[in-house]
Amino acid sequence: MAEDMVTDRPKHYVRPDVAGFLAFLNAMDGPEMSALPLAEARAAYLAMTPVAEADPRPLSVIRDLSCPGPAGQIPLRLYDARESRDPGPVVMFFHGGGFVIGDLDTHHNLCTEIAAELDLPVVAVHYRLAPEHKFPAAPDDCEAATRWVAGNPAELGRKATGLIPMGDSAGGNLTIVVTQALAERPAEVPVVLQVPIYPLSDEKSDHQSMVDFGEGHLLTRNAMEWFGESYAAKSGDKRAYPILGEHATTPPTVLVTAGLDPIRDSGRVYGIELIRAGSDVIFLEMKGSIHGFVNLRKAVPSAQRDLHAIFDAIRLLLDKHKDDAAR
């Protein structure tokens, strides 16, 4: 290309639908979520669902369950496109929300999409939230629920032959933490794949992505500080910062980041450690998109394509390792 034909590009590419959504958000007059009373912040997060998220998919099975946990019963929700099915993998879904906000309802629509498109049962976990229940309440509950499903309880009505931890943001962190815990002390069935979506993996607060995108890109530096203070994770603990854990035993991984996410680089450095350890990983960075895109598919239509790219990667790794095991 001739030098005079080169056009200037913005430093950070922003998709048109993302730019429109951010312009709408940033024009709103009101306090940040981190400045709201806790109950109002949680209600505001839930209220975003019908406005920003795609409608739920119809499924044959949507059923609330619970399982024993270290501090009482843990609420769960089972999703399945089939009334009954043969034994196979089960997706364990851990919702995002900074360990402070979020629940089964904030991620309900997303879980219906996962179950419908992957044709696998999904068990969503509502772990205890901070600040009422600080670290390690969340990983304790998620690990307990995953071990319960691995034991094939009659209440589930489906036989798990393998586990697929999956989650977004805080749930991405919990995905990695649970996967590492079950590698260290195996459950009754193995983790066959993990899917952390824009996870927090380390405690470094000054990654370049935080500098570049800590304001005006939905998730803010202030929100991250609020989440961190509420969760009160122990510095240097691998159950809070799983980049400190063992990576050589990591199962196949679909790792997802967003190009305009303040915690993008925390996901990137985790991917580097997986590659160094020789783990089988598909790394997907959604260029021009923001943290939270999997729950913004109405407001940001291009996020639907991103989500389906994640599903394609999951299918690819499941098929690959099924073929490897058959050899």
Image (spheres, grey):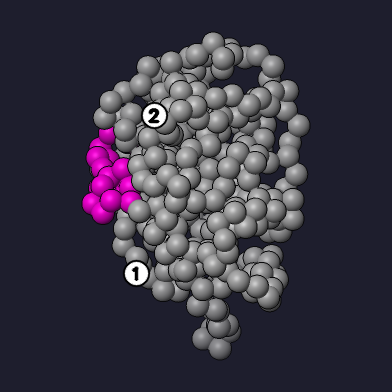
* Closer to the eye: label 1 or 2: 2
Position of residue 120 measured from the top left corner of the image (x, y, whole percent): 59, 26
Position of residue 296 measured from the top left corner of the image (x, y, whole percent): 66, 54
Position of residue 324 measured from the top left corner of the image (x, y, whole percent): 39, 24
Spatial separation of the CA atoms under disc 1 and disc 2: 34 Å
Residues shaded magenta: 233-250
Residue at the spot x=31%, y=62% of the render? Answer: 204
**Most foreground residue, 42 or 164:** 42
Query: Is 310 positioned to the left or the right of 72 in the image?
Result: right
**Would residue 237 be seen by someone viewing this image from the given angle?**
yes
Residue at the spot x=72%, y=48% of the render? Answer: 54
Please name the residue that numbered disc 1 is placed on: 206
**Residue type marked 1:** Asp
Magenta-colored segment: predominant secondary structure? loop
The dot on residue 70 is 2
Query: Is the residue under label 2 in contact with that under label 1 (CB below 8 Å)?
Result: no
The answer to which quarter of the image holds residue 57 is top right
Q: How many numbered discs?
A: 2
Position of residue 56 measured from the top left corner of the image (x, y, whole percent): 73, 39
Does the magenta segment cover residue 152? Answer: no
Mark 2 element type: loop
Mark 1: give few (<14), some (14-19) or many (20+) Cα within 10 Å.
some
State which tag comes first along the sequence, 1 or 2: 2
